[in-house]
Image (cartoon, rainbow, N blue to C red):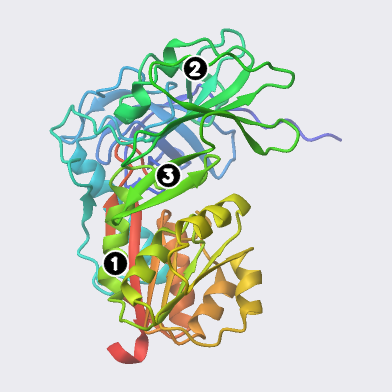
Amino acid sequence: MQAEPTKSLVGEEYEVEIGPVAHGGHCVARTAEGQVLFVRHALPGERVVARVTEGEEGARFLRADAVEILEPSKDRVEAPCPFAGPGRCGGCDWQHAKPGAQRRLKGEVIAEQLKRLAGLTPEEAGWDGTVMPAEGDKLPAGQVPQWRTRVQYAVDASTGEAGLRRHRSHEVEHIDHCMIAAAGVSELGIEQRDWTGMESVEAIAATGSQDRQVILTPRPGGRLPLVELDKPVSVLRVDEKSGGVHRVHGRPFVRERADGRTYRVGNGGFWQVHPKAADTLVTAVMQGLLPRKGEMALDLYCGVGLFAGALADRLGEEGAVLGIESGKRAVEDARHNLTDFPRVRIEQGKVESVLPRTGITEVDLIVLDPPRAGAGRTTVAHLSSLGARRIAYVACDPAALARDLAYFRDGGYRVRTLRAFDLFPMTHHVECVAILEPAQKGS
């Protein structure tokens, strides 16, 4: 006998009181029956009508949008962006919140993750509880920082128009301008062009140079358009079979500036998206590590060599840095970017595979900037065995950071300081820098 299909609750509406903010750009509420709702476009303390967007009867939780605000929070503002709101563009989470409130919400998420996953209070983590805006981003309510130097536009298959994806959807929200896009991206005029035959168009505007780049991903069998934009731009395309990135015309890289150096970043490789992010993070890491001449350092998940370069600069001719990065093109770029440092070595491969093979048994300093999932128990255990006097952990996900901090505690390290930076305004994302040291020093 077949079980009856579970009834979908999509479209059902509930009048609810909004509870605390949760990790992921939504707040928690409960229906009268006690079912958990993750509600977007709401703020803690509000009373709203929430319409279910995902979920069925008996599910652990439902996803919903606040479609009517019955009792607004004092932190609520009219969303500056005309494309923000329930069922609209998924690029921003907090357009409806005052800038200061956004940072406070992010701080609450960090504190909750630290407590739940690492058993740490803000005081125990050496954190004052604040999330710092980037330089120049402290704007009045209603104004939006133009910070996103890399924007991935989705292309509507039926019209060829570029837009942004709706939240948790493949549907394209047609836009004529993205408010959080950096001026160097906006001035390309991507939204005004016909991109028929393309799956997506990524636009990049480098910081510290005039380099502009678009990366086209064609649909199967799609022909590349003649790219005529409002500013000079290099064009690359993604190969539909291999996924490799190939130059069409112009440079295959952009030049980014940070910490007084120029970094080549090829084929759309990773670089911090906020124009102030690279300098902000380098400063926080170096202030936390206080590198000394002649020390040995590791830079793990090193990308194109941002922290390796900063370390090498400060460790002097007797110092040494080993960087490890899995991306082949990023390793080529890192080696090119750091060619003037003879005592910097960059190895290609996954950290968990390469690090044990190096035979390194002790280091003075470690920087790690892992992907969103974090470094994980095994890698953290290995790092804890190397006896570093200080470790800098750069994290774009507070949950992964908190989990790894618990593993570091198991390995004999405690958090000395933690700083949080709002390098993704209007979204739920936040960047943290934790500085760790051997626990016995603080006991």
Residue 323 position, x and y percent, is: 51, 67
Type of the residue with mark 1: Leu
Taking depth in this image into account, of 299 and 316 the one nearest to the observer is 316
Q: Which residue does the numbered mark 2 point to in the structure image?
A: 162
Q: Nearer the viewer, mark 1 or mark 2?
A: 2
303 to the left or right of 5: left
Q: Nearer the viewer, mark 1 or mark 3?
A: 1
Type of the residue with mark 2: Ala
Q: Earlier in the sequence, mark 1 or mark 2?
A: 2
Q: Nearer the viewer, mark 3 or mark 2?
A: 2
Type of the residue with mark 3: Gly
Taking depth in this image into account, of 338 and 373 the one nearest to the observer is 338
The correct choice, above or below, for 320 with respect to 372 in the image is: below
Q: Secondary structure at mark 1?
A: strand
Q: Earlier in the sequence, mark 3 or mark 2?
A: 3
Taking depth in this image into account, of 253 and 56 the one nearest to the observer is 253
* Residue 84 visible, this orientation: no
Image quarter hosting the C terminus:
bottom left
Tell me which residue sits at (28%, 75%) in the image: 124
Q: Which residue does the numbered mark 3 point to in the structure image?
A: 24
Q: Secondary structure at mark 3?
A: loop
Image quarter hosting the N terminus:
top right
